[in-house]
Amino acid sequence: MHQPTLALRLRRLIAAVALPRLEPVLLAVTATALTAGGIAWLAGAGSLADLFWGLGTLSAVVPAVGWVLAALRHGRAGVDLIAVLALVGTLAVHEYLAGALIALMLATGRTLEAAAQRRASHDLRALLEHAPRSARRRTDAGVATVPLAEVAAGDLLVVGPGEVVPVDGRVESAAAVLDESVLTGESLQIERARDALVRSGVVNAGGAFELRATATEQDSTYAGIVRLARQAGAESAPVVRLADRYAAWFLPLSLAVAGLAWLISGSAVRAVAVLVVATPCPLLLAAPVAIVSGLSRASRLGVVIRDGGALENLGRARTLLLDKTGTLTGGRPRVLDVIAAPDVRPTDVLRLAASLDQYSPHILARAIVDTARERGLALSVPTDVTEEPGRGATGTVDGQRASVGRLGAATARPDWAKAVDTRALLDGAAIAWLTVDGHLTGAVLLRDPLRHDAPRTLRHLRAAGIDRLLMLTGDRAAPAHEVAAVLGLDDVRAELGPADKVAAVRAERERAVTVMVGDGVNDAPALAAADIGVAMGAHGSTASSEAADIVLTADRVDRLADAVTLAQRARRIAVQSALGGMLMSLAAMGAAAFGLLPPAAGALLQEGIDVAVILNALRALGTDQATRPALTPAAEALIHRFAAEHDDLQDVLDAVRDAADRLSDNPGPTALAAVEETHRLLTERLLPHEYAEEHELYPALAPTLGGPEATATMSRAHTEIERLSRRIAIHLQLAHAGGSLSAEQLDDLRSCLYGLNTVLRLHFTQEEENYFSLAP
């Protein structure tokens, strides 16, 4: 009866002394005691000085014992044990000044560590907040709202627009349009036909539909994700402090030297002197200072690291697992290309589609409108607009009846539209078709694009020592493999659910220290299961941020490479400081063992060692130039300017492709006019842009990139763009002289246009990856 009570009291004592507010209080008490004792000693009151110093020493003993017991409960005997022995020893031999100095060291180190080791809760509040609490059940008496716990398999439920699907079930209506990004990470909305299975947690992105429940709340998908995340977080192994790893051999060595000194000399004072200089302040202070400095430096880069253990682990990571949507890609669809019917311009297709989509909440509609505005198109105000969920919008624009969205399966497609279908399949893109007055007029291809900074980030991660890069995604296999091929990933696993991701993370953890990067609710369990979970916090879910050890507050994945490099540097400096300080402590221990250093002098010498290693540890606050090239303000402004111009010039790239397509379809006057318009755009807009890049941007970047050779490849692309443009101009001169394009010109002109389109798209992508991603 007494044994459990004693154990309970012991646990409560340990919990009490481990309170986060204890460390700063202890620091204030020990500093005050040491200062008061020093003043009393200078005033000639030696007994009073000893009293103050003794009280300061005693104030540190109780919490230090609590910290040691807490460590022993977890099977660790950390650095605090040497400090406890030294504190008790100084009290036993009446070396109160030495004890007060050790107490101050201990309090300072613990305060720094507490600041570095505060970890946010893993209770996944956002997961629980997202989960519905009730459902609307349809019965013979009508529709009634009931608690979710009362829903049984077989119940008929009504899910309204924007509502979360409460339980797993089957669609009972004709169709349901769903946003499944919460579970799969896929940003495009999905249409589920009658009798299709729907999982709980997804959002109704269309009109209201009926759902036949196939599971209860506890047996549904979303509840399983919450349980999985909690289990993964609970099973994560505790981080072993860097200081404790070194203490594993330093502690027994210190005790052995102290014991031998006492045994050989017969003097307990010598043993205490050895313990005083053995008090591992390089571990208690230097390592936490380096880690705290690293955390501070990371926060300035937009990287919030929960605690020092996460920073230490990140510096040792060798495997990186990444989600696709929102991590390697932008997380939102963007316009990939605009394709027009033979008698229509791509710009007109985009303008009409965007004008009609202005009031639509659909994610694809927003992407079309944003692109049109970025390109400076003047949008008209539509009238009589109606929208059918899963089909698209219809209305009147500039006196024409237009619709944008899906086409029915029975709709006849001309040859150019069949080519659009093929291209969408190859590119993994969605299609928004535009019809005007009943005629198919054009199409807008949309895809979630790769982040511009992703390729550079992964190159830097490999250079930093990450040996294995894998993608884990709930997306389809085809787009996932395409992204993996572009980025040069070691492996890709697609169509994974949350449990599959957790299993993959656990398998990789058995091989090496593993980092998981994600941004969605479906990533939260995997983030909790990894050694280090990294959340894209700028636009990611709160749940992923709650489950992560590191949150990237800036919407830039390249901050991850910065964080890895920074963590490695901070850990390297911490190791240097700890090992250097311990070597100096070992030398002092030898002197103390031979009676050359009394306890008080040893404590003062130890303070000198502490100052040296702390100054070295503070280097972690500085900037490693290898982390990110330093840009001048002028170069940064130029990058932003030319990045904006790239967005403006997308219609020129569309025009080049459209002109080549028209030549292939019908090389008549319409095609010739398209080529002439393309040449005008090249001459008036594109070539001046390329000239300005060559003579303004590249010279500004050369010092940052290491010289003009770094931009030589891009300069060669400028030359090729100019050569192809000049060749197109010559073809136009020949056509004007002959009255039309001759048959001998067609193959070469087509090759010039398609080649120019390819070179331009590749060149734009390379500049955005290699240069534009440098700017914050």
Image (cartoon, helix red, strand yellow):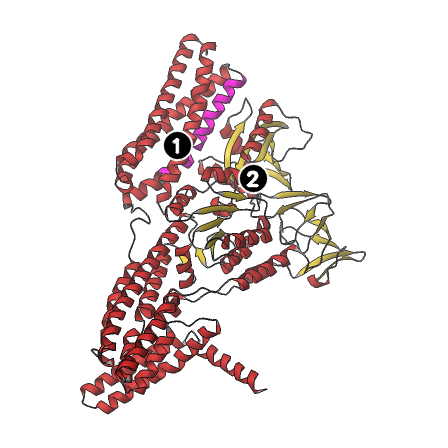
State which mark lies toward you, 1 or 2: 1
> Which numbered circle lies on residue 286?
none
Residue on which the image places disc 1? 763
Q: Quadrant of residue 146?
A: bottom right
Give the answer, above or below, for where 691 lies relative to 128.
above
75 vs 460, nearest the viewer: 75
| Mark 1 element type | helix
Residue 665 magenta-highlighted: yes
Question: What residue do we see at 53% from left, 30% from top?
Answer: 349
Which residue type carries mark 2? Answer: Asp
| Mark 2 element type | helix
24 vs 743, nearest the viewer: 24
Q: Earlier in the sequence, mark 1 or mark 2?
A: 2
Give the answer, above or below, for where 408 lies relative to 255.
above
238 vs 620, nearest the viewer: 238
Would you say residue 358 is visible in this rendering?
Answer: no
Kindly report the secondary structure that dominates the magenta region of the rendered protein.
helix
Which residue type carries mark 1? Answer: His
> Pointer 1: residues within 10 angstroms few (<14), some, or many (20+)?
some
Question: What residue do we see at 48% from left, 71% from top?
Answer: 74
Where residue 234 sits: x, y (%)?
Answer: 54, 64
Q: Quadrant of residue 768?
A: top left
- Which residues fall within the magenta stretch? 642-667
Residue on which the image places disc 2? 357
Where residue 117 sits: x, y (%)?
Answer: 41, 66
What's the distance in space between the residues labelled 1 and 2, CA to CA? Answer: 31 Å
Q: Is residue 548 left or right of residue 4?
A: left
Q: Is residue 355 left or right of residue 575?
A: right
Question: What residue do we see at 71% from left, 59% from top?
Answer: 216
